[in-house]
Structure formats: C-alpha cells, structure tokens
Image: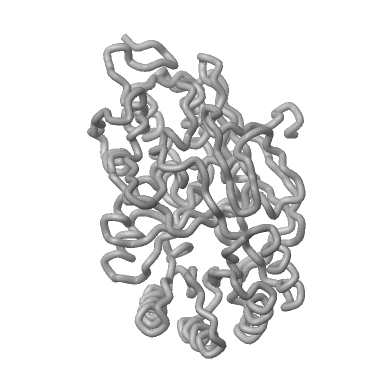
C-alpha cells in the first residue's frame, strides 16, 4: 500500500539525497528529460532529478481534493505591441489545485492572441474540464496523472492549459515535501537574470524606455521588430544611442520575409550594431526561410537565430535539428507544457543547440515556475522572463524577489507564490 499524498513507504526517495540514482520510467513521455545531465555555469552540472523530480513523479501518490480555474485579468502599464498582435490587458487563467493532505499548488495558463491556440473563454472551459478530471481520478502516482493529462490535452491546442495544470500539480507536490521548485529541478542556482522587452514603439518612446531600463540595471534588451523594416532600423539606432552598452535581442515574431531579415542584419552591421540573438525572423512555417536566415546570420554576421513560434512540439524540434534550421530553441511552457519542455531540453542539448527560456505575457505565477526551472537547471543561455515587470499590478502574494534584472528564489516550498483566491473574481 501507499499513503495517499505521501511517498510509497518502501521506496527510498532520491530527493532526500542529491547523490541518489534515478529510476527510469517505463512510459515514454517521462522517459528522457528527468535523467539528463546538463552542462551549467562554470564546472557545475545539474540533473533534472538530482533533488528528486524523476523519483518524485514515480513515488508520490497524488489525491486531488479540489481543483479549479478562474480568470486572471491584469492591466498592463502600456499596450504591448508585437509584429503579430497587440495586447492591452492580460486575460489569462489561474489554476488552483489542493491535495487531500491540504497542500495547495498554483499554475497559470497564459493567453496571447495569434500565438496561443486558445482565447480566455475556451481556455477556462478546458481548464475546468481538466480540473474535473483530476478531481475524479483515483489516487495514483504523479507520473501517471501527468501522463493522463497529456493524453486528454495533447499537442499545441490548449497547451497553455496543460501547462497551467501541470504547474499547479507539481507545485502542490513540492509544497507537500517542503522543497522549493528550484531545488527540485536541480539546485544549480537560486537566482536568474532576465532581459527586458521593448515593444514596437516610435523611436523616441523606445529610447526613453531603454534609458529607463539602463538605470534599473538591465544589461540586455529584447527589441520587438517585424512590422516595418525602415522603422525598425530607426528604432534600433535610437535605442543604441540611449543605452550604448546594452546587449540586444531582436524578436521579429514571424514578421519578416527572409530577405528582409537578412537586410536588417546587413544594415545593423553597417551601423556597427550586432544583436546577440535574432528570434523567429520569419513565419513559423517558412522552414526554408528560417534555414536561409540562420545560415547567413551565423556565417556572415556571427549572430545566432532562435526558433520560437516554429517550435511548438517535439516534432518541430527534431525537424529543426535535422535540417540545421536554427541555433537556439526558445522553450516556453505555455507552448509545450512542463513535461514537454523537459523532453525538448534534453533533445536540444544532445544536439548541441543552445537554449532560451521565455514566456507569453504572464504574472509571477507562471514566470515564477519558469524561473525556478531555469535556476534549478542552470542550462539556459538566454533568459526572457520579464513580462510581470510590464504589468501595472502584481496579483501574486509572496514568491520570488525582484532586484532590477535579477530574480532571487528563496527556500519557501514550491514556487512560494499564491493568489488571494477569494478576491480573484
């Protein structure tokens, strides 16, 4: 027998010892990611399960007593405009899961028009369906329950809902064993440093933001481009003048043709500007264009290209690897879920690709979970987890501490953040 909400009593849990060996599961979805040894900062290495994630999924019996999704609406400081859409207010879905032992976990399903497949109404409906399912489920190992969720919410459609429920369940279990998520995911670090995004704006406004972020301690700016080639180049020049020492990432959000993307790199080179990364320069289905831009960017200008919208699942990653279509994979939990992300991380690292972690437009619930993952693994070259800084309100109580570009995760169990559920109507 096993105790519901506790570990199987005959199993020695690996999270009690960082040196314990990991068991490999029989089912394929979790069979890879949790056992990979990643290269990290300096001489340090991290195994996803070194503090017990793999073993925990197999040994912890989950009995869900309550689960619910609710709208999570938060205003932005200013409209967030990218090449493919404009957002004036965040309309996400919050997930709360409570286990029979009283432990509570939190998750968030972000909604970004034209990027996620769902809107808030359909995401909320699907979230309630999944919450009803896990409440009806008999007590079972966390691994089995997570795999069942993948089966009922597969693929890209409603991936953000799957991610939100996965976050909440994993957070609840981490709360049960009193372990912070960053330790559960490897314990390499308890902090991360993020870039910050400047949306598509007129040059003067963009330059003012760049100067503001410089004084706040941000060293890397992520610049949204892709709507107008000439305007983008003008904005980039203004930003560099305002913040000359910054590193910058270009993110076209599918907005350019291959020829336009290459022209941007050429003009920037002539201006003495070189991005550290060029993210999703062409439409997500323009595989030939992605390959062409990646080759030119890498071979002529020494710039890496990241696949974001082009990477919506394991099949896309394999295509990118085999076709040498990009140098970097942008991992977003809302695109592939937590478990899908772990699997993609392993495959991308084995193939020699660099990793980026990003998000949609989320509160500190989802960003907190992603930040814990990034800190614990320590294997992300680019970290883009800034969107809570773009919100005019912070609905999350507790959680990580923010000091400019640095997020610090404490030893609070789970992710440490939660909502005032009674007020979240």
Q: Nearer the viewer, residue 165 or 174?
A: 174
Residue at 70% x, 29% y: name it. Answer: 421
Q: Is residue 213 above or below residue 258?
A: above
Q: How many numbered discs?
A: 0
Q: Nearer the viewer, residue 362 or 123?
A: 362
| Place of residue 383 in the rendered image (x, y in percent of width and height, measured from the top left) | 50, 56
At 75% from the left and 70% from the top, the residue drawn is 208
Of 173 and 239, the residue lying toward us: 239
Quadrant location of the C terminus?
top right
Horizontal side of residue 361 vs 293, given as left or right: right
Say how the picture is coloured. Answer: one colour
- x, y percentage for residue 389? 68, 52
Residue 344 at least partly seen: no
Can residue 118 be seen here? The reply is yes
Q: Quadrant of residue 207?
A: bottom right
Q: Quadrant of the N terminus?
A: top left
Q: Is residue 132 left or right of residue 290?
A: right
* x 54%, y 72%: residue: 250
The part of the image, by quadrant, that contains residue 209 is bottom right
Q: Going by the image, does 310 lie left or right of 92?
A: left
Q: Say if 69 sits above or below 270 in the image.
A: above
Q: Is residue 415 left or right of residue 121?
A: left
Residue 130 drawn above or below residue 275? above
Query: Residue 393, percent across and down?
Result: 75, 45
Residue 238 lies, in percent from the top left, at 68, 80
The answer to which of 328 and 64 lies nearer the viewer is 328
């Amino acid at each position: 027998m096993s105790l519901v909400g506790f570990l199987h009593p005959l199993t020695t849990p690996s999270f009690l010892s960082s040196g314990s060996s990991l068991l490999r599961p029989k089912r394929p979805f979790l069979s890879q990611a949790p056992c990979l040894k990643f290269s990290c900062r300096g001489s340090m290495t991290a195994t996803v399960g070194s503090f017990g994630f793999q073993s925990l999924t197999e040994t912890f019996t989950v009995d869900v007593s309550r689960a619910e999704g609710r709208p999570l609406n938060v205003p932005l400081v200013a409209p967030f405009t990218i090449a493919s859409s404009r957002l004036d207010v965040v309309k996400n879905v919050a997930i709360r899961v409570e286990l029979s032992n009283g432990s509570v976990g939190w998750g968030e399903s972000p909604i970004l028009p034209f990027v996620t497949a769902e809107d808030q109404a359909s995401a909320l409906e699907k979230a309630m369906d999944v919450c009803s399912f896990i409440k009806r489920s008999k007590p079972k190992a966390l691994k089995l329950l997570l795999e069942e969720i993948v089966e009922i919410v597969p693929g890209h459609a409603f991936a953000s809902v799957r991610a939100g429920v996965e976050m909440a369940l994993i957070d609840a279990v981490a709360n049960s064993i009193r372990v912070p998520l960053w330790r559960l995911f490897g314990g390499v670090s308890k902090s991360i440093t993020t870039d910050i995004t400047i949306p598509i704006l007129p040059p003067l406004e963009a330059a003012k933001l760049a100067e503001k972020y410089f004084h706040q301690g941000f060293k890397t700016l992520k610049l949204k481009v892709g709507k107008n080639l000439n305007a983008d180049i003008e904005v980039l020049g203004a930003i560099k003048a305002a913040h000359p020492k910054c590193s910058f990432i270009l993110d076209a959000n599918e907005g350019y043709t291959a020829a336009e993307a290459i022209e941007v790199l050429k003009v920037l080179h002539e201006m003495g500007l070189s991005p550290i990364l060029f993210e999703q320069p062409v439409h997500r289905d323009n595989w030939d264009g992605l390959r062409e831009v990646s080759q030119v960017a890498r071979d002529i200008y020494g710039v890496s290209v990241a696949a974001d919208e082009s990477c919506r699942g394991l099949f896309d990653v394999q295509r990118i690897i085999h076709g040498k279509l990009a140098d970097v994979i942008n991992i977003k939990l809302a695109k592939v879920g937590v478990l899908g992300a772990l699997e993609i991380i392993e495959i991308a690292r084995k193939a020699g690709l660099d990793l980026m972690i990003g998000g949609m437009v989320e509160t500190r619930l989802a960003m907190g979970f992603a930040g814990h993952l990034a800190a614990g693994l320590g294997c992300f070259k680019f970290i883009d987890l800034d969107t809570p800084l773009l919100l005019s309100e912070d609905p999350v109580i507790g959680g990580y501490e923010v000091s400019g570009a640095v997020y610090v995760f404490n030893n609070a169990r789970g992710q440490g953040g939660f909502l005032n559920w009674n007020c979240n109507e």
